[in-house]
């Protein structure tokens, strides 16, 4: 059972593309999908057709109106809420995995309806009120108790929805979550309830990405007056949300049998964030080399003056920096084209701002918004794959470009430096597959692109390095082989005392 948050099959590219690869890469296995999103309005029709070996599909939305239990008076169970208080303190103090596991074993059985920590007890009991008030008085630096109270309630209500999902999910031999967050917490609940194995694969570090999102958000209220604010401190409620997602991450790490990172820097970050080092490992993304290498024969002998950014038009991709860089590129190469190949429907307001910047810079003839494109149609026509993101993991788009013989210019995020320049001495000896530049530096970005496009020998050397690196380290065969080993371990786990697996309809809703 794949536990997916905000990705496949409703969002294209990136992690969704990887999930699609994984399912299709193991046609002998049957997969279920449990999709978790924020609100149903955030997602349209699926971007991917479900492979035939997906035998169950359900979707759930965490931030829509919940079916609240009827109001009832309750004193609450003092012992249960004392355990909750101690659990929160343990998370604050960086408790060990063993300690967190003990608390989860005690708390999880109390979450179902009718138990001491069910949704009714959280919403209406005197003990819950006293617990929230006590935490506010001890820790909160925001003056508004009202804001704190409703933030805590909104933050925690998905826990009971996830508990219900875990309880109703068809029996499964093993679980694979592709992030921490809500999907990872669901995986932890399932592990504690069923005893079945759980693997976690993190492409980016979820808590880092949520931190970026939360610092950019405008919906979190700051009730401090002008004389109460410290410019060096984020609003308390913003920090509270960040700590909440960090706690979900620690709980998922505690429950996971295998914790996969895409590259070494992220594995070390997982360990620093609480992942047991002995359970962590690296499995790099891989691409279908045999499919993409055929595109090399379609490429012209000289680099076309086309810079192509393949990705969603959203702030984390920093499309604006690429557009501003194109102004400098066009100043020196008037015929240069900047293609933006990706959907614009995820953040229409941001997409409109990007189009406005291109128009204001006089680039309407040079910067083209192409929407979603088949990479086989565009890779033979471009001189450089560009990536201007402020956060990435190990981007498949660079690997696909490399396989087609297209060098890159990329910002210094995630594993981009490793992909461009190599990881160890043997890898570095292959040469540079392009250039890495600073984040949000349009001039540096532009000049790196100009150097590659205007120096044919250098461009061909980068092309050769790109091809050699992807062929040696980043293929489907390598990636699938490593995941096959993990899946085999999980599938040979002694069966738990559960009913036989129920094969659901691929389009059923939970």
Image (tube, helix red, strand yellow):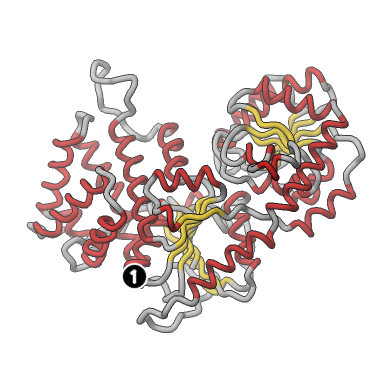
Q: Is residue 372 left or right of residue 508?
A: right
The crowd level at tag 1 (other Cα within 10 Å; few <14, some 14-19, many 20+) is some
Above or below for 454 versus 433: above
| In this picture, residue 329 sits left or right of residue 60 | right
Classify 154 as above or below 283.
above
Task: Residue lying at the far front in this picture: please name it.
Answer: 425
Residue shown at the point (52%, 42%) measured from the top left:
265
Splitting the image into 4 quarters, where does residue 302 fall? top right
In percent of width and height, residue 136 lies at 17, 38
Left or right: 426 as drawn, with respect to 301: left
* Nearest the eye: 138 or 42: 138
Instruction: Name the residue tied to disc 1.
Output: 167
Residue visible at 51% across and 66% down?
33
Work out which quarter of the rendered image holds the C terminus and state it.
bottom left
- State left or right for residue 106 relative to residue 36: left
Q: Measured from the top left, where is residue 186 in percent x and y?
A: 38, 60
Q: Nearer the viewer, residue 23 or 509?
A: 23
The residue located at (33%, 19%) in the rendering is 231
Q: 208 or 475: which is nearer to us? A: 475
Picture coordinates of residue 143 (x, y %)?
20, 29
Q: From this viewpoint, which residue is outermost toward the bottom?
A: 500
| 339 in relation to 126, above or below | above
Residue found farthest to the right: 301
- Measuring from the top left, give residue 230's x and y in whole percent: 29, 20
Counting every numbered tag in the picture gives 1
Corner quadrant of residue 466: top right
Q: Residue at x 46, y 61 (%)?
A: 258
């Amino acid at each position: 059972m794949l536990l997916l948050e905000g990705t496949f099959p409703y969002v294209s590219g990136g992690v969704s593309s990887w999930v699609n690869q994984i399912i299709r890469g193991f046609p002998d296995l049957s997969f279920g999908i449990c999709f978790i999103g924020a609100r149903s309005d955030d997602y349209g029709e699926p971007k991917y057709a479900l492979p035939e070996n997906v035998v169950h599909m359900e979707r759930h939305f965490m931030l829509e109106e919940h079916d609240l239990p009827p109001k009832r008076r309750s004193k609450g169970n003092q012992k249960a809420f004392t355990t909750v208080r101690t659990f929160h303190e343990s998370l604050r103090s960086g408790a060990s995995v063993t300690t967190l596991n003990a608390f989860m074993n005690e708390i999880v059985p109390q979450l179902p309806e009718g138990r001491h920590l069910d949704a009714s007890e959280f919403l209406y009991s005197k003990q819950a009120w006293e617990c929230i008030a006590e935490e506010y008085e001890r820790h909160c630096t925001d003056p508004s108790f009202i804001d704190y109270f409703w933030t805590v309630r909104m933050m925690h209500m998905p826990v009971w929805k996830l508990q219900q999902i875990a309880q109703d999910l068809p029996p499964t031999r093993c679980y694979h979550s592709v992030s921490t967050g809500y999907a990872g917490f669901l995986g932890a609940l399932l592990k504690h309830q069923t005893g079945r194995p759980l693997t976690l694969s993190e492409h980016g570090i979820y808590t880092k990405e949520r931190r970026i999102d939360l610092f950019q958000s405008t919906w979190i209220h700051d009730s401090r007056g002008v004389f109460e604010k410290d410019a060096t401190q984020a609003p308390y409620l913003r920090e509270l949300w960040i700590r909440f997602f960090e706690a979900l991450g620690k709980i998922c790490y505690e429950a996971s049998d295998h914790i996969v990172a895409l590259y070494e820097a992220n594995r070390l970050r997982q360990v620093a964030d609480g992942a047991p080092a002995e359970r962590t490992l690296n499995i790099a993304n891989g691409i279908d080399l045999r499919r993409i290498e055929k595109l090399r024969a379609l490429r012209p002998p000289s680099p076309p003056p086309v810079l192509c950014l393949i990705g969603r038009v959203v702030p984390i991709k920093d499309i604006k920096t690429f557009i501003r860089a194109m102004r400098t590129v066009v100043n020196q190469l008037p015929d240069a084209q900047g293609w933006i190949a990706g959907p614009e429907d995820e953040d229409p307001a941001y997409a409109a701002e990007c189009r406005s910047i291109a128009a204001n810079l006089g680039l309407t003839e040079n910067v083209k918004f192409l929407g979603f494109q088949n990479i086989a149609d565009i890779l033979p026509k471009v001189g450089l794959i560009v990536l201007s993101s402020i956060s990435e993991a190990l981007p498949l788009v660079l690997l696909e470009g490399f396989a087609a013989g297209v060098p890159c210019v990329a910002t210094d995020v995630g594993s981009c430096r490793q992909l461009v320049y190599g990881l160890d001495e043997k890898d570095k000896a292959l040469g540079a597959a392009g250039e890495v530049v600073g984040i949000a530096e349009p001039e540096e970005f532009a000049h790196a692109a100009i150097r590659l496009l205007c120096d044919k020998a250098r461009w061909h050397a980068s092309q050769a390095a790109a091809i050699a690196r992807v062929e040696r380290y980043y293929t489907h065969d390598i990636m699938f082989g490593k995941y096959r080993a993990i899946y085999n371990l999980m599938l040979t786990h002694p069966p738990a005392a559960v009913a036989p697996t129920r094969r659901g309809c691929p389009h059923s809703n939970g």
